[in-house]
Image (cartoon, rainbow, N blue to C red):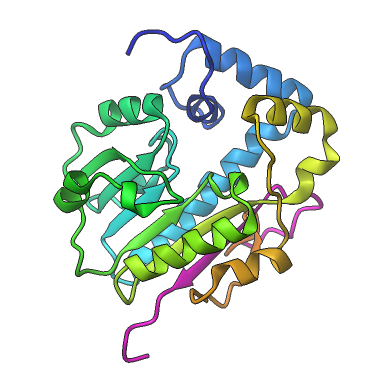
Amino acid sequence: MSEPRIPNSGRIIDHWLGGVHHFPVDAAAASEFAGLYPGFPQVYRTQRAFVGRAVRAVADEGVDQFLVLGAGVPTQGNVHEVVPGARVLYTDIDPDNIALGREIVAATPGVDYAYCDASNLGTLEREAAERILDPAAWLGVVAVGFSTSLEDGALQATLSDIFDWAPPGSFLVADFDGQALLSLPAILAKILDQAGRPLHLRDPGRIRPLLGRWRLSEDGICAVDAWRTSAPPPDKVFAYGCLSHKPDDSS
């Protein structure tokens, strides 16, 4: 992959996570964001740690295949590293993330990277899905990093579509950006400028109805820092996480 001149959010996050799949332009952008709020790299570390704990919990239920929506760069504690031997299909809409992701997982059996617009599962590359995922087996769907771009109605419809598509017995791991960004005007303005669209920041009361028919685990919806940990809830919640289940037909 030739060295880019424009930073990429997936590679910026890889830099914050301590990975090696980024370029000087990404490191510079990461430093700029961290300069506006020094705790920002830790936000993504806690999000990745939450995904790791949730994915392990799903694997403990007997699930050995995962679809990751909005995957970014698949490194540093991502699903195939957390559950070695699992079949994992990472997806994104960013062509740079897809190209780099394919390079990263090329040598890992049962793991691939494909295009999919998370708001429209019909865009999932059929050949990759058929090669990696067993449509009759339980599935872990990991939905990360894209909910902020969708307004409530669109996100609710997306999660409903995922529910209909996933086999009974499947699980949904999801995170949602919290409202703590509102307390950081400088970095919020920077993100808004780069995103070029509104950001939808939510609290648990707003998140719960969006899950629809997904059956929320007893953990509820909580700060990713505190999900199945002994850590107290943080004063500022940058991301909430939850684990939900699609009951078997007999349930």
Residue nearest the viewer, comparing 73 with 160: 160
Q: In this view, does 76 lie above or below 67?
A: above
Q: Is residue 165 above or below residue 31?
A: below
Residue at position x 57%, y 50% in the image: 147
Q: In this view, does 122 lie to the left or right of 224?
A: left
Q: Give coordinates of residue 44: x percent, y percent.
A: 59, 39
Work out whether residue 111 can be spotted: yes
Q: Give coordinates of residue 204: x percent, y percent.
A: 70, 65
Q: Give coordinates of residue 125: x percent, y percent.
A: 25, 44
Q: In this view, does 171 lie above or below 114?
A: below
Q: Give coordinates of residue 140: x percent, y percent.
A: 35, 61
Q: What secondary structure predominates along the stretch shown in magenta?
A: loop
Residue at position x 38%, y 49% in the image: 68
Region rendered in magenta = 229-251
Look at the image and say whether residue 239 sits in the magenta stretch. Answer: yes
Q: Residue furthest bottom?
A: 250
Residue at position x 33%, y 66% in the image: 165
Q: In this view, does 151 lie to the left or right of 250?
A: right
Q: In this view, does 197 lie to the left or right of 129?
A: right
Look at the image and say whether residue 112 sits in the magenta stretch. Answer: no
Residue at position x 68%, y 58% in the image: 231
Quadrant where the C terminus sits is bottom left
**Numbered marks: total:** 0
Quadrant where the N terminus sits is top left
Work out whether residue 37 can be spotted: no
